[in-house]
Amino acid sequence: MPILIDELRAFVTENFLFGRTDDFLTDDASFLENGIIDSTGLLELIGFVERTYAIRLGDEELVPDNLDSLQKLANFVSRKLAGGASGSASAYGSLAASDAEPIGVRA
């Protein structure tokens, strides 16, 4: 998974931190709480993940537990690539159960 985190970090750094490469973006830093990504940026991040890893994110999967840090996003993408492990939907299925609120608007 280190390669996955590195790929995600490169995208976030290039597109949202404008190349800033200091220790600001840790694996567990919340994108939203730290002002790294706003709701529009979240749509851009989702599009990148869907295109790059050939997966489809369902609306019900757009929750902070899946998308709000490099580590959470890498874990989520890994589960999706493995066929949808517990707590995530398959590429075109629905989330089994979640009380989490969506964090972005689906375009």
Image (cartoon, rainbow, N blue to C red):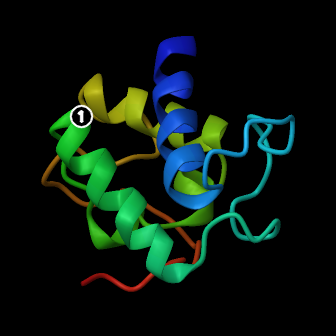
Quarter holding the C terminus is bottom left
Q: Nearer the viewer, residue 21 or 97?
A: 21
Q: Position of residue 53 (x, y in %)?
A: 24, 34
Query: Which x, y percent locates residue 74?
Result: 51, 33
Q: Give the image quarter of residue 19.
A: top right
User: Which type of secondary structure does the marked residue at label 1 adopt?
Assistant: helix
Q: Residue at x 61, y 63 (%)?
A: 64
Residue depicted at 47% across the width and 69% down the height: 42
> Is 78 positioned to the left or the right of 20 in the image?
left
Q: Is residue 30 left or right of residue 45?
A: right
Residue 50, given in percent of the width and then of the height, sits at 23, 49
**Res. 1 visible in picture:** no
**33 shown above or below 6:** below
To which residue does mark 1 refer? 53
- What residue is drawn where x is 49% and y is 14%? 3
Q: Give the percent coordinates (x, y) of residue 76.
A: 46, 39
Please give the name of the residue rendered at 49% of the width and 56% of the height, measured from the top-left corner: 15
Q: Would you place residue 101 above or below residue 95 in this image?
A: below
Tell me how many marks there are.
1
- 102, above or below 24, in the image: below
